[in-house]
Each structure stands twice: as C-alpha cells, then as structure tokens.
Image: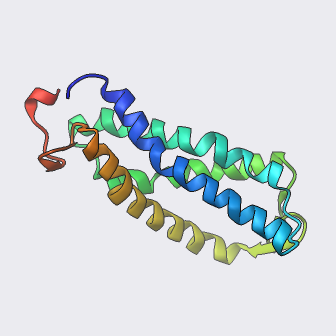
Amino acid sequence: MNTYRFLRAYMAGIVVPTIAVPFGLVVFIIARYGFQIPVPIERVVIFPMALIPTLFGLWNMLYARLSTGRYLPLGLHGALLPVVLIPLGMAGAVAGQFLSLGSKGIVWFDAITIPYTLFVPWIAVVMMVYYLIWKYLVGFCNKILELPGYGIRGPNRTDPADH
C-alpha cells in the first residue's frame, strides 16, 4: 500500500490516545464524584481530549516523514513527545488557573503541592511510558497500516518500492 502515507500515519497515531482518553475521563469522574476530590473536570479534560490525539497523529506523521531517512526508532521518537506535551499542558494549566508555580513546588488546584525534586523523575517515568506506548502500540498500528519502516517486513526495514 503506497497511497496516503501521511493520512495512514495520522490515523495510526490517534488510535491509542483516542481509546485511552475516555478511561482517563472515567478516573476523573470517579475521583470527583465518588471520592469528593474537588477536581474541575471541565477545565482539566479539555487539553487531553482535544490535543493529545491530534498531537499523537501529527507526531506519527512526522515519524513517517523522517523514517525514510533512518531517523530514530519509533519508541525513542515517541519518548520525545512529552518534551512537547508537558510544557503545553503546563502552560494551559497555568492559563486555566489550576496550576501555579510556588516556592516549594508545583501547586495543583491550590491544594496539592508537588515538590520540584519529584518533577524530574516524573518526567523520566512519563518518557519511559511513552517509549513503551509508541514502540508497541503505535508501532502495531503502523504495522497494520503498512507504513514505510513498519511494513510486513518488520520494523525499520523498508522496501525501495515504498518510497
């Protein structure tokens, strides 16, 4: 299959977050109404539901474009996505007034303080999770849609006819 490579890459990229975001919504609803945690769902959920699937799709399109020149393995490419998502998410949270940067750490909803010393390990864990998601789940979707670099022949083995 040699047509619509970027459309197929976009569709393969949005599958995983499109399936995962409703589960995150369920967790927020249970936290807010089941455990009475004052989390403003309407302000917190807009960013993940609107942007994360789109950014996954665009990021996979970038991988499809760069993979023709032997860019990076898909897992490492996906592990770099939080470098884009975390600053965007934090900027949106600050603009939405449910995150602030205090002297001792990051303050969520004026109630939960996360020390700065935990922020760097948290980013490392997020990058590892993204590595696994991209290597196995998005890679599987890329393989199903026969994208160059993830065709029937296996990862990063392209056929000159695919270009």
Instruction: Where is residue 70? Give x, y as percent.
Output: 21, 42
Q: Is residue 10 visible?
A: yes
Quarter of the image where one finds residue 137 = bottom left
Instruction: Where is residue 114? Give x, y as percent.
Output: 75, 74
Q: Is residue 103 visible?
A: no
State the residue at coordinates (34%, 47%): 141
State the residue at coordinates (58%, 45%): 52
State the residue at coordinates (28%, 38%): 145
26 shown above or below 49: below
Left or right? Give the position of 3 relative to 138: left
State the residue at coordinates (17%, 26%): 163
Q: Residue furthest left?
A: 160
Q: How is the image coloured?
A: rainbow
76 shown above or below 120: above
Quarter of the image where one finds residue 25 = bottom right
149 shown above or below 5: below
Residue in the foreground of this view, choosing between 125 and 146: 146
Instruction: Where is residue 148? Give x, y as percent.
Output: 22, 37
